[in-house]
């Protein structure tokens, strides 16, 4: 008879640890970290579109471009133009 694995009651970091302040840039970075934790590369890149766009609109263009490059590297070369 196999033993059941006991739950620790703690969620993984990517499911929790949302910022506790009203800084929208911090929220967008947190959303991007959660997208980065996704296993499906296509889905992660698709969901990262919105926070990257808003991060750029908040005046963090260089950081947004770094995030774009980060997600493009995850995609197969055939999909990236």
Image (cartoon, grey):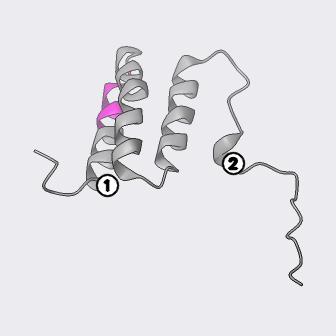
Indicate the secondary structure of the residue bearing disc 2: helix
Which residue occupies 68% across, 28% down?
A: 19
Q: What is the residue that sits farthest to the left in this orientation?
A: 81
Q: CA distance from mark 1 to mark 2?
A: 21 Å
SS at circle 1: helix
What's drawn in magenta, residue-wise?
Answer: 60-65
Write down the residue under mark 1. 74
Quick one: quadrant of the C terminus? Answer: top left
**N-term mark: 1 or 2:** 2
Q: Position of residue 7 (x, y in %)?
A: 86, 60
- As drawn, the label of residue 60 is none
Give the quarter of the image for residue 3. bottom right
Q: Residue at x 88, y 52 (%)?
A: 9
> Along the line of sight, which residue is nearer the eye, 2 or 17?
2
The correct choice, above or below, for 67 with respect to 13 in the image is above
User: Foreground: 5 or 63?
Assistant: 5
Residue 37 locus on image (x, y percent):
52, 50
């Amino acid at each position: 008879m196999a033993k059941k694995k006991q739950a620790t009651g703690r969620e993984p970091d990517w499911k929790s640890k949302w910022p506790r302040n009203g800084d929208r840039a911090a929220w967008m970075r947190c959303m991007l970290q959660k997208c980065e934790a996704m296993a499906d590369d296509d889905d992660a890149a698709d969901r990262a579109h919105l926070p990257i766009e808003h991060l750029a609109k908040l005046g963090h263009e260089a950081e947004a471009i770094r995030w774009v490059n980060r997600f493009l590297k995850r995609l197969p070369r055939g999909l990236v133009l």
